[in-house]
Amino acid sequence: MLKPYLNSNVIEAGCDEAGRGCLAGPVFAASVILPSDFNDPLINDSKQLSHKQRMQLRRVIEQYAIDWAVASVSNREIDQINILNASIQAMQKAVGKLSKIRPQHLLIDGNRFKPFPGIPHTCIVKGDSLFLSIAAASILAKTYRDEFMEKISKEFPLYGWETNKGYPTRKHRESIAKYGTTPYHRKSFRLL
């Protein structure tokens, strides 16, 4: 069972990103502050859930979270500052977009983060499978990113983004080899 918090006496926001390993599209991140007594046994690392489960849980999270926000960093920015910096920037943007309450501590999924002004943080490797707020953030980041990729797949239907979401599947790489890149591809990645 996932832990509700790291420190019970402060307002914590969980942060996670989605789309780091993709060849196309932005990286998305979310920040979520849950009530200390919140519990939903289905919430887990978004990678462990089906699309249907993620969409159902997204509605639960958006309804019951004290505050939540989603942000993204474009593929062009990723090419300029690299994917690690872009992932951190997306998480920082998501924290900055929290509008109802300012967190007193950030729980960051992973092992790297740059300090957010005035808010201490703790990096937790595999945090999305340990803490509810990080798992909730992973679900929001993943569902919002998937929706974005489905939307742009209509613009560029040859790459299968409606199913592969920009990840390096065989079909995606074969389409790049056959049709070239799109304005959404990350040119700094090994695309072939």
Image: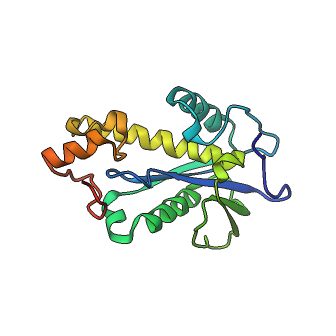
Q: What residue do we see at 68% from left, 55% from top? A: 13
Q: What residue do we see at 32% from left, 65% from top? A: 79
Q: In front: 111, or 99?
A: 111
Q: In front: 34, or 183?
A: 183
Task: Answer above or below: position of 30 versus 39.
Answer: below
Tell me residue 143's x, y (percent): 49, 39
Rendered-image quadrant of the N terminus: top right
Rendered-image quadrant of the C terminus: bottom left
Q: What residue do we see at 37% from left, 46% from top? A: 167
Tell me residue 141's x, y (percent): 51, 46
Q: Name, please, the residue furthest toward the left.
A: 179
Q: What residue do we see at 52% from left, 26% from top? A: 52
In this rendering, the count of numbered labels is 0
Res 33 seen here: no
Image check: 67 left or right of 150?
A: right
Q: In front: 127, or 140?
A: 127
When asked about the image quadrant of residue 9, the answer is: bottom right
Res 168 seen here: yes
When asked about the image quadrant of residue 178, the answer is: top left
